Amino acid sequence: MVGDEEQERDFQRFLRRVDDIANLVQGLSSTDSAVNAKAIAEAEKRLRDQECSKEEERNTTVNRTIINTRASVRNGFLAMLEKDAKERAKRRKRNEHLANALKEKGNDAFRKGDYVIAIQRYTEGLEKLRDKQELYTNRAQVSVWE
């Protein structure tokens, strides 16, 4: 698979870097002055290259185009989340209003002694708003009277 091949390549690159560093450390600890001098020069070169790489990275992150592109994607996503949350809140408010109206109709039916209709209204209210505890309680109380 493509992902496995890419992981394998990354792993092999990592192992090569480990070998390079191990060889560099070995050269730095060598008693041979020529090998030691070569290792020191290589270490200094790597440090300079790393510093240049960090500088390029800092310059890239300051690049407004990249920052704005990422920000616009992030802001677009956040805007979608906010819109979804507002729609859900509106839908919940509407369902809560409907559930309250059905609860009142169930209460009226209960007062009139029409227990079957009361249970139906409480059940309809629960279909609109499943977490409205008093609808469960009222329906259970009607079941006792029925």
Image (cartoon, rainbow, N blue to C red):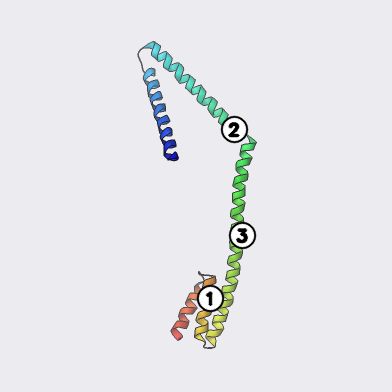
Label 2 with label 1: CB-CB less than 8 Å: no
Q: Which mark is residue 124?
A: 1
Instruction: Name the quadrant containing residue 72.
Output: top right
Q: Residue furthest front?
A: 1
On the image, the x and y values in percent for residue 71 come to 61, 43
| Name of the residue lying farthest toward the bottom | 113
Residue 8, compared with residue 145, is above or below; it is above
Secondary element type, mark 3: helix
Disc 3 residue type (three-letter): Lys
Residue visible at 64% across and 37% down in the picture: 65
Q: Position of residue 99 (x, y in %)?
A: 56, 73
Amino acid type at mark 2: Thr
Viewer-side residue, 62 vs 8: 8
Residue 86 shows which numbered tag? 3
Write down the residue under mark 2. Answer: 60
Alpha carbon of mark 2 to alpha carbon of mark 1: how far?
58 Å
Query: Which quadrant of the figure has residue 29?
Result: top left
